[in-house]
Image (spheres, rainbow, N blue to C red):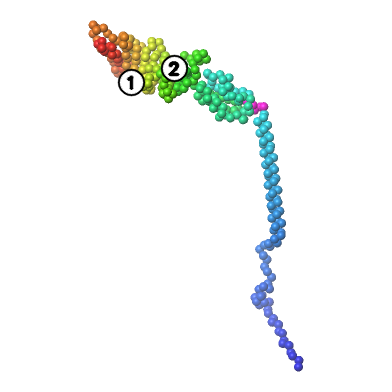
Amino acid sequence: MTERLPIQRRLIVPPALDAVLDPALEPPEDAPFLRPPRRTRLRARRRGWTSRAVLALQLGGALLVALSGLWTAYSKVMASERLRVARVEVRGGHFLSEGEVRELLGPAVGENILNLDIEALKGRLRASPWVADATVSRTLPDVLRVEIRERVPLALAEMDRLYLMDGDGALVDIYGPRTAGFDLPIVRGLAKIDAEARRDRAARAGSLLSDLGELAAEISEVEVEPSGDLRVVLRGAGEVVRMGAPPYRSRFVTFLGLRQELRERCPRAEYFDLRFRDRIYAREPPETAAKPAAQPAASPTVLPDTHEMPTGPRIEPIRTDAAKEGG
């Protein structure tokens, strides 16, 4: 008996239903980008590093060539004969000659003007006691300009020897044949004291002479006392004027304006004290102030007050102790 095989029936599914039942059978949609294989990516990366290395080498070579060119140009400029200092122009010098200024500058002449240390040159100039300040500038191609401000001697400081002294009390130079042309007042009271006290006293005398200006020509000598007061001896008759703190000029001008009147009213007075405001005290020397006992004592002469004498402040002659005892 023959067996019958089961009849295989095909299930016919509509296309639409088949798509729903088996989505995997659908063709894939287009991807947003196609990723290249790994070998392709490695090859591209190697080409990128190679390009960068070549570019870096090219830039480095160009930089070396540029630096070499700059160094060559710099060397030629520094070795150029046109840039060597050939002339030094000096301004502001009255006591120092141009040769002395050149000597202070040292071996600047002949050096390359761009290679000079300007600050060092200023320091060399300021090291001179004659130079209060100095400026140095370059003028291409070969000129060095120097402008100095010199110290102006106002007095002769008496110490172990005579020295020229300026208005700040600084010692400028030794008084000798080279500086004998200076006709200046002598400042005393600076010897045999310590350096700090000497500087203070010298500065006080220098302040007086600076304040007086051209009127300092009336002064023969200035003695700085330990108290700080200034004992000033005038030229000519040799009157002694005592001064304390500033202002000096206004009080000295007042005294000079009354000088002739003082001689007429106090002919024997040789000492005048200007330390007090609106007053000038005059004192006679002891040898002329004493009076014989048989004569009546003379009372001190008091000149009128300022409102009665518009030419200046009140003037009071002061008698010495000898005159008082004689009275």
Q: Which residue type carries mark 1?
A: Phe
> Residue 143 falls in which quadrant of the image?
top right
The numbered mark at residue 158 is 2
Q: Is residue 90 above or below residue 21?
A: above
Residue denoted by label 1: 276
Q: Main secondary structure of the magenta part?
A: helix
Considering depth in this image, is 271 or 139 the residue closer to the camera?
Answer: 271
- The answer to whether residue 266 is magenta is no
Left or right: 214 with respect to 307?
A: right
Pick whichever of labels 2 and 1 is earlier in the sequence.
Answer: 2
Q: Is residue 113 above or below residue 313?
A: below
> Residue 302 falls in which quadrant of the image?
top left
Mark 1 lies on a secondary structure that is loop
The residue under the point 39% across, 16% down is: 232
So how many labels did they put on this image?
2
Instruction: Locate residue 36, reporting x and y percent.
Output: 70, 61
Which quarter of the figure is the C terminus placed in?
Answer: top left
Q: Which residue type carries mark 2?
A: Glu
Which residues are drawn in magenta? 81-85
Q: Is residue 271 above or below residue 136?
A: above
The numbered mark at residue 217 is none
Which quarter of the figure is the N terminus placed in?
Answer: bottom right
